[in-house]
Amino acid sequence: MPSMAAYNFSRNTQQHQSKGDFFARKQKIEQQRKNLPIAEVERRLMEEVRNNDTLIIVGETGSGKTTQLPQYLFKWGFCHDGGIIGITQPRRVAAITVAKRVAEESGVPLGQRVGYAIRFEDVTSVQTKIKYMTDGLLLREALLDPYLSKYSVIIVDEAHERTIHTDVLLGLLKNVQKARSKSINGVVNTDHNNSNAGHDLEERIGNQNDGILKPCQAKKYNLLKLIIMSASLDARVFSEYFGGARAVHVQGRQFPVDIFYTHKPETDCIDAALITIFQIHLEEGPGDILVFLTGQEEIESVERLIHERLRQLPESSRKLLTFPIFSSLPSEKQMKVFMPSPPGYRKVILATNIAETSVTIPGIRYVVDPGLVKARTYDPKMGVDSLIIVTTSKAQALQRSGRAGRDGPGKCYRLYQESFFEKLTDSTLPEIKRCDLSNVVLQLKALGIDDVVNFDFIEKPDRTAVVNSLWSLYLLGAVTEENKLSDVGHQMARLPLDPVYSKALIVASQFGCLKEMLICVAMLSVESIFYAPREKLEESRNALKSFASPEGDHLTLLNVYRAADEFFQKNKMVNSEERAEKNLRKWCKDNYINSRSLKHARDIHSQILRNVEQMGLRVTSCEDDMLLLRRCLAASFFLKVAMKQPDGAYRVTLSGLMVQIHPSSVLFRAKPECIVFNELVRTNHSYVRNVSRIDYLWLIELAPHLYAVQD
Ligand code: CDP
Ligand code: MG
């Protein structure tokens, strides 16, 4: 394939970089840094940070906020007190790719002065001074270190995204900042090593919360500087929340972008995207293409289809390279989107909305925007959280088109009609208003914040949503009748997982099948383990048969993992690790398993294994006692049970919602009487995915607080 050969060539030149190349690249990077809009205001920005404990920085995407500001802060001595600079990102990909870039810009190996940490991966060391991380990770750190004492500066980046973690973090940081500034004035003593300090912190802040920040007078060491960065021009909401904090604007550089709409509504957005990509490739001038897609599955199928269509083109028109970017893509692959395309080639970047504001890829002149995004939604009445594909907001559409005008005038192809754009909402509803809150409520409680309803959120979640999440935490045994965190709840909060999965691991350790449950949870935490291209549906179905368990998807996933692991371990006995990995990828391909997803699951598995070992849970195996494992699934996932109805549909026991088993499930045809499931997907119908057959009688025995003998 011509694209691969060319690609390898560019990678090899990277690996054998000569001294001259190295200096040339260094110089180029220096030049790029100097040219960023933010570089012009470095001194002024640093003065603002010095004069304001909380600062809001608004700047257009690509102006250099994320990569440059932490470096400026380091240079201007904002961590001379021994503290470090933390920068949170809503997305793991952004944390990783930006940290890598900044390490390179600073001329240091990643993980030393510049590092990153995301759930299941920590690339930092004691030398780390600039630490990129996800917002969720910093929240977890607060559980162990309630004062976030190792940070001198915390930058909450991409605040306009208003992820649930960002929103909670803002409230928490406001408290921490107050407590730390008061400690300077001798009111509170910071106790860095006290892991129970969370309770004290809340109490102390609760007692002395006068809502006024003390000016920066005392020792720098204890002061926490907060910087909120946003790409949205409306800084007011953040400024008001932080008591009228100062907001500054960094001017961006933007070339005009021509917007095109379709004449009629598109029914097949993948096909429309493909046609547009090839139209640009064959008819437009040089420049790379950025396509916004909804997720890994869609990206992988578009990538495949592009390669297929390329093969039908004459040799001279095949100079098109594809680069996917989505969150579970292995991190070494993520950086490839930033590499310039070889001369004569055009790049197509297939991205989720990661590329909307979080990462800026140079060289884009064309944007293809189907106007869709995968979003979490929550139905408080039904108590169900689901991932659905929704239309973007106007603000998102504008951000997306803006990506085409960074390096010169660009073009954006919106795959919908202009009249449709007018109907889009202005901006997206903050996540806290549209998702299940159990995880957040559990974490806040673990931090000692019991009165979640009255927590100082930037925007309050709906009361019903809070009450529902408290109710499900109660049913899971995480909170007591007095609304306090139970011992099990404390254990659950220590695991970086959804509460239901944390609970499953704890239950499994009692059942004696934790080894198997760890695998199930790891496999459930990744998207699409099975690879089923439309054109090879038959072959992929046959391949699945060798793993399929008549008892359901959980056992099927376990079979896949076990088979892959056995293959890998055997291989490792006779081959190098690298070779064994390569052979495993081949094995995946032969068996229609998505090797990227499997690798991700294996990584998650080794992390949570470490977590449960640290917690002192017993990791024993039930070997082949699958009955025991299924009973354990029932004891863990009893909140998500559905019963077959006379018409063959299923009724979710707790909500009454009518659902169907998803066609991808091994139980799609078998239709057992009673099932547990993990995921609810809503398209035209409501489907449940990751389904296992259970016996209703088990529920009466294992979850008697919810299930009784039926009449
Ligand atoms: O945060 P903001 O959107 O203001 O910009 P940034 O992410 O700091 O990006 C500044 C510049 O760095 C852009 O021109 C990016 O293309 C470049 N960059 C890069 O070349 N490689 C990365 N891994 C990250 C950023
Ligand atoms: Mg940024």
Image (cartoon, helix red, strand yellow):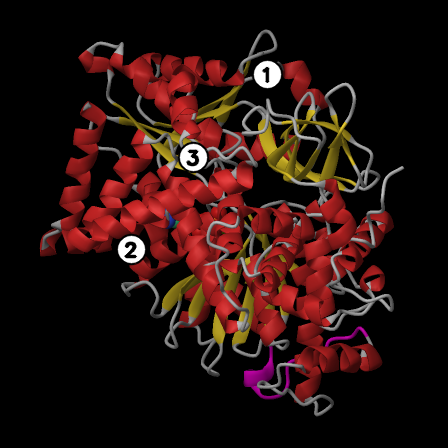
The secondary structure type at the circle numbered 2 is helix
> Mark 1 = which residue?
416
Nearer to me, 411 or 539: 539
- Disc nearer the start of the sequence (2/3): 2
Q: Amino acid at mark 2?
A: Glu
Q: Residues within 10 Å of mark 1 (few under 14, many from 20)?
A: many
Bin the neighbour count of mark 2 within 10 Å (Cα to Cα): few under 14, some 14-19, many 20 and up: few
- Residue drawn 80% across and 64% down? 455
Amino acid type of the residue that numbered disc 3 sits on in the rendered structure: Phe
- Three-letter code for the amino acid on which mark 1 is drawn: Tyr
Q: Tell me, yes or no, whether the two marked residues, 1 and 2, touch with CB atoms within 8 Å.
A: no
Q: Residue at x 26, y 36 (%)?
A: 586
Q: In the image, which residues are magenta?
A: 211-224
- Residue 309, quarter of picture: top left
Residue with the mark numbered 2: 30
Q: Which residue is mark 3?
A: 547
Mark 3: secondary structure: loop
Disc with the residue nearer the chain's start (3 vs 1): 1
Asked whether disc 2 touches disc 3, contact meaning CB atoms under 8 Å apart, the reply is no
Q: CA distance from mark 2 to mark 3?
A: 53 Å
Tell me the quarter of the image containing the C terminus.
Answer: top right
Whether the magenta-drawn stretch holds residue 276 is answered as no
Mark 1 or mark 2, earlier in chain: 2
